[in-house]
Amino acid sequence: HVSHFWAFDDDEILDPECRRPAFWSGYYPNCNNFHEYDLTTKYDESIVGAENHEYDSAYVSHGYFREVWLIENHGYEGPDETLALKVFRYKHDMEFKNLETVRKDALVMERLTASPRIVNMYGHCAFSVSVEAIENEMEEFIVPGDGYAKPEDLDDSEDVDPKNHYTVPEKLDIALAMAESIADLHGFEEGVIVHDDIQLCQWLKTRDGVLKLGDFNRAEIMFYDEENERYCKYNNGNGYGNYRAPEEFDARDLNEQIDVYSMGNNIYGLLTGLWVFYENEDDGVVQDKVIKGESPFIDERYRTRSYIEGRLVEIMERCLEFKPNRRATIFEVVEFLRETKAEYDRRVAAGEEKAPDAASRIR
Protein backbone atom coordinates (compact mmCIF):
# COMPACT_ATOMS: atom_id res chain seq x y z
CA HIS A 1 0.00 0.00 0.00
CA VAL A 2 1.28 3.46 -0.94
CA SER A 3 -0.32 6.38 0.89
CA HIS A 4 -1.80 9.33 -0.96
CA PHE A 5 1.16 11.49 0.05
CA TRP A 6 3.61 9.30 -1.88
CA ALA A 7 1.32 8.39 -4.76
CA PHE A 8 1.02 10.75 -7.73
CA ASP A 9 -2.73 11.13 -7.26
CA ASP A 10 -5.17 13.85 -8.24
CA ASP A 11 -4.96 16.42 -5.46
CA GLU A 12 -8.07 18.23 -6.65
CA ILE A 13 -10.13 15.26 -5.51
CA LEU A 14 -8.14 13.96 -2.55
CA ASP A 15 -6.80 17.22 -1.09
CA PRO A 16 -8.53 20.19 -2.72
CA GLU A 17 -7.21 22.86 -0.33
CA CYS A 18 -3.45 22.38 -0.65
CA ARG A 19 -2.34 20.97 -3.96
CA ARG A 20 1.06 20.01 -5.29
CA PRO A 21 2.49 22.05 -8.20
CA ALA A 22 2.74 20.24 -11.51
CA PHE A 23 6.51 19.76 -11.35
CA TRP A 24 6.31 18.03 -7.94
CA SER A 25 5.88 14.61 -9.53
CA GLY A 26 8.73 14.93 -12.03
CA TYR A 27 10.93 11.85 -12.38
CA TYR A 28 13.67 11.64 -15.02
CA PRO A 29 15.93 8.62 -14.41
CA ASN A 30 18.78 7.64 -16.72
CA CYS A 31 19.77 4.35 -15.12
CA ASN A 32 21.82 2.94 -17.99
CA ASN A 33 24.61 5.42 -17.26
CA PHE A 34 24.85 4.19 -13.66
CA HIS A 35 25.28 0.58 -14.78
CA GLU A 36 28.50 1.58 -16.54
CA TYR A 37 30.23 2.47 -13.26
CA ASP A 38 32.36 -0.27 -11.68
CA LEU A 39 33.14 0.60 -8.08
CA THR A 40 35.29 -2.50 -7.57
CA THR A 41 37.96 -1.95 -10.24
CA LYS A 42 40.69 0.67 -10.35
CA TYR A 43 41.74 1.99 -13.74
CA ASP A 44 45.31 1.11 -14.74
CA GLU A 45 46.32 1.88 -18.31
CA SER A 46 49.25 -0.59 -18.08
CA ILE A 47 46.90 -3.57 -17.74
CA VAL A 48 45.93 -5.39 -20.91
CA GLY A 49 42.33 -4.60 -21.67
CA ALA A 50 42.32 -1.40 -19.66
CA GLU A 51 41.21 0.45 -22.76
CA ASN A 52 37.83 -1.23 -22.35
CA HIS A 53 37.49 0.04 -18.78
CA GLU A 54 36.61 3.71 -18.99
CA TYR A 55 35.96 4.57 -15.35
CA ASP A 56 38.29 5.00 -12.40
CA SER A 57 36.53 5.01 -9.04
CA ALA A 58 37.52 5.95 -5.50
CA TYR A 59 35.52 6.05 -2.26
CA VAL A 60 35.60 9.52 -0.65
CA SER A 61 33.36 9.75 2.41
CA HIS A 62 29.82 9.38 3.64
CA GLY A 63 27.09 11.36 5.34
CA TYR A 64 24.17 10.01 7.31
CA PHE A 65 22.16 8.81 4.30
CA ARG A 66 24.66 8.43 1.47
CA GLU A 67 28.26 7.67 0.64
CA VAL A 68 30.23 9.50 -2.03
CA TRP A 69 32.47 8.06 -4.74
CA LEU A 70 34.58 9.93 -7.26
CA ILE A 71 34.26 8.58 -10.78
CA GLU A 72 36.79 9.62 -13.40
CA ASN A 73 35.79 9.06 -16.99
CA HIS A 74 38.67 7.89 -19.19
CA GLY A 75 36.56 7.79 -22.34
CA TYR A 76 37.85 8.31 -25.84
CA GLU A 77 35.92 11.47 -26.60
CA GLY A 78 37.26 14.68 -25.06
CA PRO A 79 39.34 15.16 -21.92
CA ASP A 80 38.98 13.11 -18.74
CA GLU A 81 36.20 14.33 -16.48
CA THR A 82 35.36 13.63 -12.86
CA LEU A 83 31.94 13.34 -11.28
CA ALA A 84 30.69 12.49 -7.80
CA LEU A 85 28.44 9.49 -7.36
CA LYS A 86 26.17 9.56 -4.30
CA VAL A 87 24.78 6.15 -3.39
CA PHE A 88 22.47 5.10 -0.57
CA ARG A 89 24.14 3.53 2.47
CA TYR A 90 23.22 -0.08 3.21
CA LYS A 91 22.48 0.73 6.86
CA HIS A 92 19.19 2.34 5.78
CA ASP A 93 16.07 0.62 4.56
CA MET A 94 15.46 0.90 0.83
CA GLU A 95 11.87 1.94 1.34
CA PHE A 96 9.59 4.25 -0.58
CA LYS A 97 10.06 7.19 1.78
CA ASN A 98 13.83 7.15 1.28
CA LEU A 99 13.42 6.65 -2.46
CA GLU A 100 11.24 9.75 -2.50
CA THR A 101 13.88 11.71 -0.59
CA VAL A 102 16.46 11.01 -3.31
CA ARG A 103 13.91 11.75 -6.06
CA LYS A 104 13.29 15.20 -4.60
CA ASP A 105 17.03 15.86 -4.37
CA ALA A 106 17.37 14.99 -8.06
CA LEU A 107 14.23 16.87 -9.06
CA VAL A 108 15.40 20.14 -7.50
CA MET A 109 18.77 19.94 -9.24
CA GLU A 110 17.07 19.05 -12.52
CA ARG A 111 14.62 21.96 -12.37
CA LEU A 112 17.34 24.43 -11.29
CA THR A 113 19.78 23.39 -14.02
CA ALA A 114 19.78 26.91 -15.45
CA SER A 115 21.18 28.40 -12.24
CA PRO A 116 24.98 28.74 -12.03
CA ARG A 117 24.58 28.74 -8.23
CA ILE A 118 23.14 25.23 -7.91
CA VAL A 119 25.23 22.03 -8.13
CA ASN A 120 24.97 20.43 -11.59
CA MET A 121 23.41 16.98 -11.73
CA TYR A 122 24.47 14.48 -14.41
CA GLY A 123 22.17 11.57 -13.63
CA HIS A 124 19.64 9.98 -11.31
CA CYS A 125 18.60 6.38 -10.80
CA ALA A 126 16.51 5.19 -7.84
CA PHE A 127 18.62 5.80 -4.70
CA SER A 128 21.63 7.29 -6.54
CA VAL A 129 22.57 10.58 -8.17
CA SER A 130 25.68 11.70 -10.03
CA VAL A 131 26.73 15.34 -9.77
CA GLU A 132 29.68 17.53 -10.60
CA ALA A 133 32.67 16.87 -8.35
CA ILE A 134 33.51 19.92 -6.22
CA GLU A 135 36.28 19.55 -3.67
CA ASN A 136 36.07 22.59 -1.39
CA GLU A 137 33.38 22.59 1.29
CA MET A 138 32.97 26.11 2.65
CA GLU A 139 32.26 25.22 6.27
CA GLU A 140 35.83 24.30 7.18
CA PHE A 141 37.07 27.71 5.98
CA ILE A 142 34.27 29.83 7.43
CA VAL A 143 34.23 28.12 10.84
CA PRO A 144 37.72 26.59 11.30
CA GLY A 145 38.19 24.02 14.02
CA ASP A 146 35.21 23.01 16.12
CA GLY A 147 33.66 26.49 16.15
CA TYR A 148 33.20 26.60 19.93
CA ALA A 149 34.93 28.82 22.49
CA LYS A 150 34.58 30.15 26.00
CA PRO A 151 34.19 33.95 26.07
CA GLU A 152 37.27 34.28 28.27
CA ASP A 153 39.36 32.40 25.69
CA LEU A 154 38.77 34.95 22.93
CA ASP A 155 41.60 37.39 22.28
CA ASP A 156 39.24 40.35 22.06
CA SER A 157 40.45 42.80 24.69
CA GLU A 158 41.51 45.35 22.06
CA ASP A 159 39.49 44.26 19.03
CA VAL A 160 37.09 41.51 18.00
CA ASP A 161 38.63 38.11 17.39
CA PRO A 162 37.14 36.53 14.23
CA LYS A 163 38.38 32.97 13.87
CA ASN A 164 38.36 32.73 10.09
CA HIS A 165 40.78 34.39 7.69
CA TYR A 166 38.52 35.94 5.07
CA THR A 167 38.81 39.63 4.37
CA VAL A 168 35.71 41.67 5.10
CA PRO A 169 34.85 42.19 1.39
CA GLU A 170 35.22 38.44 0.84
CA LYS A 171 32.74 37.81 3.64
CA LEU A 172 30.26 40.07 1.88
CA ASP A 173 30.78 38.27 -1.44
CA ILE A 174 30.24 34.88 0.20
CA ALA A 175 27.09 36.03 1.99
CA LEU A 176 25.69 37.45 -1.25
CA ALA A 177 26.45 34.27 -3.21
CA MET A 178 24.72 32.17 -0.54
CA ALA A 179 21.66 34.42 -0.45
CA GLU A 180 21.37 34.43 -4.24
CA SER A 181 21.36 30.63 -4.39
CA ILE A 182 18.61 30.42 -1.77
CA ALA A 183 16.67 33.04 -3.76
CA ASP A 184 16.87 30.72 -6.78
CA LEU A 185 14.85 28.19 -4.74
CA HIS A 186 12.34 30.56 -3.15
CA GLY A 187 11.81 32.41 -6.43
CA PHE A 188 11.57 29.37 -8.71
CA GLU A 189 8.97 30.20 -11.34
CA GLU A 190 7.11 26.88 -11.04
CA GLY A 191 6.67 27.09 -7.26
CA VAL A 192 8.48 27.86 -4.01
CA ILE A 193 11.15 25.36 -2.97
CA VAL A 194 12.36 25.32 0.64
CA HIS A 195 15.85 23.92 1.15
CA ASP A 196 14.97 22.95 4.74
CA ASP A 197 18.57 22.27 5.75
CA ILE A 198 20.52 25.49 5.22
CA GLN A 199 23.94 25.31 6.86
CA LEU A 200 27.46 26.22 5.82
CA CYS A 201 28.42 22.72 4.69
CA GLN A 202 25.79 22.82 1.91
CA TRP A 203 27.92 25.21 -0.13
CA LEU A 204 30.85 24.04 -2.20
CA LYS A 205 33.42 26.16 -4.02
CA THR A 206 34.50 25.23 -7.53
CA ARG A 207 38.07 25.57 -8.78
CA ASP A 208 37.14 28.81 -10.53
CA GLY A 209 35.75 30.30 -7.33
CA VAL A 210 31.99 29.84 -7.83
CA LEU A 211 29.91 28.95 -4.75
CA LYS A 212 27.23 26.33 -5.38
CA LEU A 213 24.41 25.12 -3.16
CA GLY A 214 23.59 21.41 -3.03
CA ASP A 215 22.12 18.59 -0.96
CA PHE A 216 18.36 18.89 -1.47
CA ASN A 217 17.28 15.62 0.13
CA ARG A 218 15.28 17.54 2.76
CA ALA A 219 13.83 20.03 0.28
CA GLU A 220 10.13 20.85 0.47
CA ILE A 221 8.24 21.80 -2.68
CA MET A 222 5.45 23.86 -1.18
CA PHE A 223 1.81 23.01 -1.85
CA TYR A 224 -0.51 25.77 -3.04
CA ASP A 225 -3.99 26.85 -1.96
CA GLU A 226 -5.56 28.09 -5.20
CA GLU A 227 -8.73 29.39 -3.60
CA ASN A 228 -6.91 31.65 -1.15
CA GLU A 229 -3.93 32.20 -3.49
CA ARG A 230 -1.26 31.34 -0.94
CA TYR A 231 1.28 28.61 -0.24
CA CYS A 232 0.43 26.07 2.43
CA LYS A 233 2.71 25.61 5.40
CA TYR A 234 4.01 22.16 6.37
CA ASN A 235 5.28 20.53 9.56
CA ASN A 236 8.45 18.52 10.22
CA GLY A 237 7.89 17.80 13.89
CA ASN A 238 10.61 18.78 16.36
CA GLY A 239 13.81 19.94 14.67
CA TYR A 240 17.23 18.73 15.77
CA GLY A 241 20.71 20.26 16.04
CA ASN A 242 21.49 23.89 16.89
CA TYR A 243 21.17 25.66 13.55
CA ARG A 244 17.43 25.87 12.93
CA ALA A 245 14.65 28.42 13.28
CA PRO A 246 12.58 28.65 16.48
CA GLU A 247 9.47 27.31 14.74
CA GLU A 248 11.42 24.21 13.69
CA PHE A 249 12.61 23.43 17.20
CA ASP A 250 9.09 24.09 18.50
CA ALA A 251 7.38 21.78 15.95
CA ARG A 252 5.28 24.61 14.49
CA ASP A 253 4.13 24.91 10.88
CA LEU A 254 6.85 26.04 8.49
CA ASN A 255 7.46 27.94 5.29
CA GLU A 256 10.46 29.21 3.33
CA GLN A 257 11.36 31.67 6.11
CA ILE A 258 13.19 28.89 7.96
CA ASP A 259 15.89 29.12 5.28
CA VAL A 260 16.25 32.85 5.96
CA TYR A 261 16.75 32.26 9.68
CA SER A 262 19.51 29.74 8.96
CA MET A 263 21.04 32.22 6.51
CA GLY A 264 21.34 34.55 9.49
CA ASN A 265 23.33 31.84 11.25
CA ASN A 266 25.59 31.64 8.19
CA ILE A 267 26.28 35.37 8.36
CA TYR A 268 27.10 35.00 12.05
CA GLY A 269 29.68 32.33 11.14
CA LEU A 270 31.16 34.56 8.44
CA LEU A 271 31.52 37.48 10.83
CA THR A 272 32.94 35.59 13.81
CA GLY A 273 34.32 32.27 12.56
CA LEU A 274 32.25 30.64 15.33
CA TRP A 275 28.94 28.83 15.65
CA VAL A 276 25.94 30.65 17.07
CA PHE A 277 25.88 30.25 20.88
CA TYR A 278 29.53 29.21 20.54
CA GLU A 279 29.97 28.94 24.30
CA ASN A 280 27.52 26.03 24.56
CA GLU A 281 27.90 22.65 22.83
CA ASP A 282 24.64 21.23 24.21
CA ASP A 283 22.08 21.27 21.39
CA GLY A 284 19.20 20.98 23.84
CA VAL A 285 20.25 24.14 25.69
CA VAL A 286 20.64 26.04 22.41
CA GLN A 287 17.22 24.87 21.21
CA ASP A 288 15.58 26.13 24.42
CA LYS A 289 17.26 29.51 23.98
CA VAL A 290 16.10 29.82 20.36
CA ILE A 291 12.53 28.73 21.19
CA LYS A 292 12.40 31.45 23.86
CA GLY A 293 13.49 34.06 21.32
CA GLU A 294 17.08 34.52 22.49
CA SER A 295 19.54 35.66 19.83
CA PRO A 296 23.22 34.69 19.73
CA PHE A 297 25.62 37.23 21.24
CA ILE A 298 27.38 39.48 18.73
CA ASP A 299 30.14 41.83 19.89
CA GLU A 300 28.90 45.41 19.48
CA ARG A 301 32.22 46.41 17.92
CA TYR A 302 31.27 44.56 14.73
CA ARG A 303 28.63 47.24 14.11
CA THR A 304 31.23 50.01 13.78
CA ARG A 305 34.40 48.12 12.85
CA SER A 306 33.80 48.65 9.13
CA TYR A 307 30.98 49.63 6.80
CA ILE A 308 30.52 46.06 5.53
CA GLU A 309 30.59 44.41 8.94
CA GLY A 310 28.02 46.86 10.28
CA ARG A 311 25.73 46.08 7.37
CA LEU A 312 26.24 42.34 7.81
CA VAL A 313 25.21 42.62 11.45
CA GLU A 314 22.12 44.58 10.43
CA ILE A 315 20.90 42.06 7.86
CA MET A 316 21.86 39.14 10.11
CA GLU A 317 19.55 40.48 12.80
CA ARG A 318 16.74 40.86 10.28
CA CYS A 319 17.24 37.20 9.32
CA LEU A 320 17.19 36.10 12.97
CA GLU A 321 13.84 37.71 13.77
CA PHE A 322 11.83 35.39 16.00
CA LYS A 323 8.56 35.70 14.07
CA PRO A 324 8.77 34.39 10.48
CA ASN A 325 6.53 37.14 9.09
CA ARG A 326 8.82 39.82 10.54
CA ARG A 327 11.97 38.33 9.05
CA ALA A 328 13.44 39.69 5.88
CA THR A 329 12.59 37.62 2.82
CA ILE A 330 15.54 36.14 0.99
CA PHE A 331 14.92 38.62 -1.83
CA GLU A 332 15.27 41.50 0.63
CA VAL A 333 18.50 39.94 1.89
CA VAL A 334 19.87 39.75 -1.66
CA GLU A 335 18.86 43.35 -2.39
CA PHE A 336 20.41 44.56 0.87
CA LEU A 337 23.72 42.78 0.23
CA ARG A 338 23.88 43.96 -3.39
CA GLU A 339 23.32 47.54 -2.22
CA THR A 340 26.05 47.05 0.38
CA LYS A 341 28.48 45.80 -2.24
CA ALA A 342 27.67 48.66 -4.63
CA GLU A 343 28.15 51.26 -1.88
CA TYR A 344 31.42 49.67 -0.76
CA ASP A 345 32.73 49.66 -4.34
CA ARG A 346 31.74 53.33 -4.65
CA ARG A 347 33.59 54.18 -1.44
CA VAL A 348 36.73 52.38 -2.60
CA ALA A 349 36.63 54.12 -6.00
CA ALA A 350 36.20 57.48 -4.28
CA GLY A 351 39.09 56.80 -1.92
CA GLU A 352 36.79 56.77 1.11
CA GLU A 353 37.72 53.17 1.94
CA LYS A 354 40.83 51.15 1.27
CA ALA A 355 40.45 47.70 -0.24
CA PRO A 356 42.45 44.88 1.43
CA ASP A 357 45.80 44.22 -0.21
CA ALA A 358 46.72 40.87 -1.73
CA ALA A 359 48.80 39.85 1.28
CA SER A 360 45.73 39.88 3.52
CA ARG A 361 43.76 37.44 1.35
CA ILE A 362 44.46 34.34 3.39
CA ARG A 363 42.35 31.29 2.64
Image (cartoon, grey):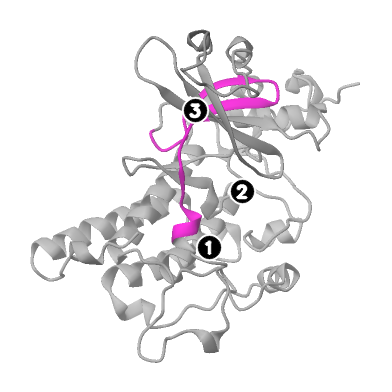
| Residue 153 marker | none
Kindly tell me whether residue 190 is visible in this rendering. no
Residue type marked 2: Asp
In this rendering, which labeled residue sits more in front, label 2 or label 3? 3
| Residue 83 marker | 3
Q: Residues within 10 Å of mark 1 (few under 14, many from 20)?
A: many
Q: Which residue is mark 2?
A: 197
Q: Does 51 sit left or right of 171 as displayed?
A: right
Q: Position of residue 66 (x, y in %)?
A: 68, 37
Going 8% across and 68% down the picture, which residue do you hit? 351
Q: Residue furthest bottom?
A: 157
Q: Residue furthest right?
A: 1
Query: Quick check: marks 3 and 1 in contact, CB under 8 Å?
Result: no
Kindly tell me whether residue 320 is visible in this rendering. yes
Q: Is residue 118 magenta?
A: yes
Q: Which residue is mark 1?
A: 265
Q: CA distance from mark 1 to mark 2?
A: 12 Å
State which tag comes first along the sequence, 3 or 1: 3
Going 51% across and 70% down the picture, which residue do you hit? 274
Residue sitting nearer the eye, 179 or 105: 105
In this rendering, which labeled residue sits more in front, label 3 or label 1? 3
Q: Residues within 10 Å of mark 2 (few under 14, many from 20)?
A: some
Q: Position of residue 219 (x, y in %)?
A: 63, 39
Q: Is residue 52 magenta?
A: no
Q: Position of residue 295 (x, y in %)?
A: 58, 74
Residue sitting nearer the eye, 285 or 246: 285
Q: CA distance from mark 3 to mark 1?
A: 30 Å
